[in-house]
Image: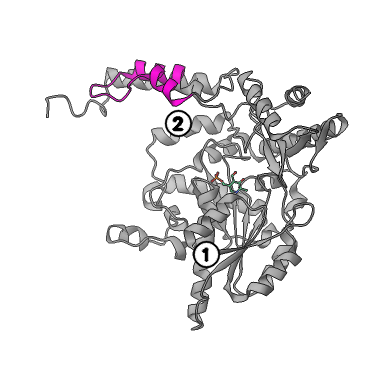
Amino acid sequence: MGDADPTRMHRISAENERIVDLVLDYSRRRILSNDTPLDKPAPPAELRRLAGRTVTEQGLGADRALSIFEHVLAPACITTDHPQYLSFIPVAPTKAATAFDLVVSASALYGGSWLEGAGAVHAENEVLTWLAAEFGLPEGAGGVFVQGGTLGNLSALVAAREEARRKLDERGLPHPARWKFVCGAEAHSSVASAARIMDVEIVQVAPDSGGVLRGDAVAAALEEHGASVFAVVATGGSTNFGIVDDLAGIAEVVESHDDVWLHVDGAYGLAAMLSPLARPHFAGIERADSVIVDPHKWLFAPFDACALIYRDPAAGRRAHTQHAEYLDTLTASTEWSPSDYAAHLTRRARGLPTWFSLATYGAAAYREAITTSIELAHRIAAEIESRDGLTLVREPQLAVVVFERDGWTKADYDVWSQRLLDDQLAFVTPSSHAGRTNARFAILNPNTTFEHLTGILDTMR
Ligand SMILES: Cc1ncc(COP(=O)(O)O)c(C=O)c1O
């Protein structure tokens, strides 16, 4: 090897001070910017041409690398926290949460074990305990922040099956030939993904005409599939429509079947329970065995964080604790180690931005911000109903508004959506329901206004 200084990248030096200043300055500008454009993706060849070769033996230096990021790469990333980003599920991190994400990195926190990260784990657990109490779960409920709803759903379902197996083993009973779980037809695709990974079967149950999965439909499925069912998955705010299943009715049915676990996927919607406007929709959630809610959705955290909460965290620990000689110090300990509660080991303390933001602004600010979007969703739904040529597909329950432009084909929606983005007016991708294409506003950014939305409707002539 050459005689270059091996500590160059790590030691405190004028070069590294400058790199840190450059990056913090960029971050400060971006966090406090009021006019970051929506931006849009660029073709790979164009990015290759504009960015040039960036990974080289000698390095480009921070000025050049950051300049490429700022002027070539960042503009090719859609601004997901833009108030006119209304597709999929947007993100709208608070300023405190975004800024604190830098602190999480700067502090090299390890969030996997109490031994290494007690302070961080304590703060994350305070958020989880607060959320559990909001949802009416009993004292002692807890869990972990994982990367996203997909991993949250998977980890909860793995714990559910492990419990079912354990209980059969305790009684000396055989396992079913094929494990199954029941979920609604509107359940998120990550639930099907969990089934594939776990190699279990899904019993998909049709919702009622309003898109709500009901207790009686779940009861019929449990009746038909008997002891092979280890869990029922209800949705607390569907992605397509923001519809909350009949949690109380489903809980009633699940409780009447021994050893069936109720998991509620509230990745998108469960945060709405913080608002008095939506709270009643979630009656019954307090009876769940596990729930998830994604702070990177409606709890205003930066990517990526999903809060996974077990009614009885011991079940999560039994399913997920990893055992290895080099981990004995951790696994022998009775302290709370977040790694034990999901399918992961090394973890970023990704709940900390939410903790800092909640600690800074207080829960009331969250209730207010969430309520604003629910009110706006209802207001724009009424506006859509009042406009000729537009049809509201369903009355919004939370803050997803789905509507059709009468007479439009899928191609019309596609052209319109592309033009909105090309004009940097909005990011609204077409969706579909029952074979019909529609437009969909997912509203959760408190900076989104009624005028933003009517401006978009005006382009549908
Ligand atoms: C209801 C629901 N569940 C699960 C997920 C998956 O979450 P993630 O994208 O964080 O993996 C989503 C994502 O939109 C969702 O809306």
Q: Is residue 380 in view from this perspective?
A: yes
* Residue 456 occupies quadrant: top right
Type of residue at label 2?
Answer: Leu
Q: Residue at the bottom extreme?
A: 172
Q: Is residue 440 in view from this perspective?
A: no
Which residue is disc 1 drawn over? 200
Image height check: is 255 above or below 451? below
Left or right: 444, with 308 as reference point:
right
Classified by dominant secondary structure, the portion drawn in magenta counts as helix
Magenta stretch contains residue 51: yes
Residue 6 in the image: state x and y as whole percent. 18, 29
Q: Residue at x 26, y 29 (%)?
A: 10
Q: Nearer the viewer, residue 248 or 71?
A: 71
Type of residue at label 1?
Answer: Val
**Which is closer to the viewer, label 2 or label 1?**
1
Q: Earlier in the sequence, mark 2 or mark 1?
A: 2
- Residue 347: numbered disc: none
> What is the magenta range?
43-72
Q: How is the image coloured?
A: one colour
Residue 241 in the image: state x and y as whole percent. 71, 44
Magenta stretch contains residue 84: no
Neighbourhood count class around disc 1 (C-alpha, 10 Å): few under 14, some 14–19, many 20 upward? some
- Quadrant occupied by the C terminus: top right
Which residue is disc 2 drawn over? 102
Q: Residue at x 70, y 64 (%)?
A: 251
Q: Residue at x 67, y 46 (%)?
A: 269
> How many numbered callouts?
2
